Every structure is written in C-alpha cells, then in structure tokens.
C-alpha cells in the first residue's frame, strides 16, 4: 500500500531539515565551531565551567547533540572541548553520551523518512537485493560495531546507512555507544592536553588515531568485530 503524498512529505521533513541545517552550518558556523574559536574563547569557557559546573555540562552536551544530529561542522572540536573542559574522565562519558543521542536523532529521522520503506522493499524483492538484505540482517551486530570502530568510516555515514537497511533502534544505540568509546577516549584525552598546546601556540595532533600504538589495537578490535561474520562464512562454505 502506497503512502499518501502529504504523509510522505511529512516523513521526509526531518531529513530536509537536517540537510538544510548541515548546508547552512557548513557556510555560517565553520569558523565559529573550529579550533581557533576554542583557542580564542578558552578563558571564558573555563571561567563559566568553574562558576557553573553542571549547567556547563548540560549546555556542552546540548551543543554536542545538536552538532551531531544536524551534521554541523565541529564534531571533532566538540570532542576536544569535552576533554579540555572536563578532563579525559568524565569528559569522555559526556562526549560519548552526547554523540550517541545526536546520532540516534539523525538515525530516527532517516529511518522514519526513508529507512522503513526501503528496508521493506529490499525484504520483498527477489534475487541479489533480497540476499544482500538477508546477509545484513544475519550480521547486524558485527557490521554495526565494525563501522563504528573503523576510523575511515565517516560518522554521518555510520548514522544513516543502518537506518536505510532496517536496523532496530536498540541495536543502533547499543553499538553506537559501545563502538565509539575507543575513539571517544582517544580524542577526549587529546582535548585534555589542550591547555599545554594553547600555551605553546600549537595545534592538536588529530592524526593521533593513526599512530601505530593506537591504530593497530583499533584494527584488532575491528577484526574481533568481524570475526562472527568470518566464522559464519566459513561454516556456510563447509555446509555447501
């Protein structure tokens, strides 16, 4: 049964709003949400944090949620800010929780607007598309953890793609929260050391995640996440 045109448009409104916000944010907020803005306003932010700790936590998390949910520029800087203001812990916790909430918002918008209909069509189709959908469903946990742990997968892509293939909300939330913890801790720890970086007039090393001592353990986690898929493929091959 086809969805009436007005209802279809209504379902797409959240995605249109996110797309418009992402474009406007990229044009208007790139400088305001960049590293230099953090450098310039660091004293004001620290003073506000010292005077109003929990309100500063709440405002920071709301800003982080908005940045992720509307795909605004500055997600990495927001993570650094969490470490700069609140240390590696509890800064990493604030960062991961806020990022998960923001990611869930854009996931639900995509799922409501496009994902449910697209997943249903893939399920009802024949041939290769149906087999792809079955393969995704059989390995959802592994695939979700894998795209979260792989540094090369953009955060926006990892939020949208699961919505388009019918991933349940609870699986998305669990794998997002747990899967972004390693990267979240790494970048929050970089942010926790920004005070010294500012004093030296330098910039943070955002390529730290690709250093061998960090990249190889992350790659090991990726391999561990992919292991169930590999074992299923081996067992399936033996069963043929």
Image (cartoon, rainbow, N blue to C red):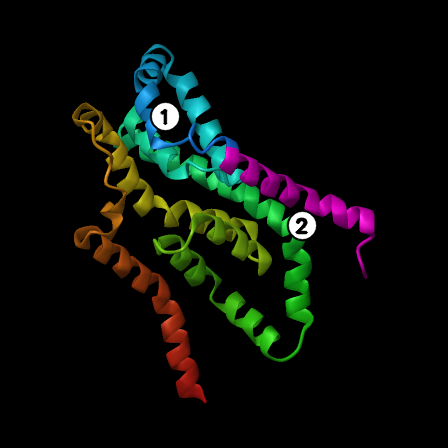
| Residue that appears at 79% across and 55% down | 3
Q: Are marks 1 and 2 in contact (CB under 8 Å)?
A: no
Q: Earlier in the sequence, mark 1 or mark 2?
A: 1
Determine the image quadrant of residue 226: bottom left
Determine the image quadrant of residue 34: top left
Distance (Cα) linking label 1 and label 2: 35 Å
On whether residue 149 falls in the magenta region, the answer is: no
- Say above or below: 158 vs 229: above
- Say above or below: 208 vs 194: below
Assign the C terminus to one quadrant of the image.
bottom left
Residue 66: x and y in percent read 51, 33
| Residue that appears at 56% across and 40% down | 23
| Residue that appears at 36% across and 56% down | 152
On whether residue 20 falls in the magenta region, the answer is: yes
Name the secondary structure under disc 2: helix
For disc 1, the neighbor class at 10 Å (few under 14, some 14 to 19, many from 20) is: few
Region of the chain picked out in magenta, as a range: 1-27
Specify the label residue 178 is tagged with.
none
Identify residue for label 2.
113
Q: Main secondary structure of the magenta part?
A: helix
Name the secondary structure under disc 1: helix
> Would residue 96 appear left or right of 28 to someone viewing this image?
left
> Would residue 158 appear left or right of 95 to someone viewing this image?
right
**Which of pointers 1 and 2 indicates the residue nearer the eye?**
1
| Residue that appears at 43% across and 17% down | 55
- Say above or below: 138 vs 204: below
Determine the image quadrant of residue 48: top left
| Closer-to-camera residue (21/181) | 21
Identify residue for label 1.
37
């Amino acid at each position: 049964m086809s969805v009436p045109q007005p209802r279809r448009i209504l379902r797409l409104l959240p995605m249109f709003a996110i797309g418009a916000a992402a474009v406007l944010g990229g044009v208007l907020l790139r400088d305001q949400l960049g590293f230099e803005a953090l450098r310039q306003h660091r004293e004001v932010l620290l003073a506000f944090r010292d005077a109003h700790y929990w309100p500063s936590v709440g405002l920071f998390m709301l800003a982080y949620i908005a940045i992720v949910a509307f795909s605004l520029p500055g997600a990495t800087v927001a993570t650094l800010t969490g470490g700069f203001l609140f240390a590696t812990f509890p800064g990493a916790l604030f960062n991961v929780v806020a990022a998960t909430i923001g990611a869930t918002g854009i996931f639900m918008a995509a799922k409501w607007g496009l994902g449910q209909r697209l997943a249903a069509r893939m399920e009802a189709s024949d041939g290769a598309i149906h087999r792809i959908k079955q393969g995704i469903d059989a390995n959802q946990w592994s695939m979700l953890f894998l795209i979260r742990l792989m540094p090369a997968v953009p955060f926006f892509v990892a939020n949208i793609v699961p919505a388009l293939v019918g991933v349940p909300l609870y699986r998305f939330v669990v794998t997002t929260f747990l899967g972004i913890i390693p990267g979240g801790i790494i970048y929050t720890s970089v942010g926790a050391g920004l005070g010294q970086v500012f004093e030296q007039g330098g910039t943070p090393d955002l390529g730290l995640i690709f250093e061998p001592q960090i990249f190889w353990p992350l790659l090991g986690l990726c391999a561990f996440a992919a292991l169930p898929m590999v074992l299923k493929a081996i067992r399936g091959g033996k069963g043929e």
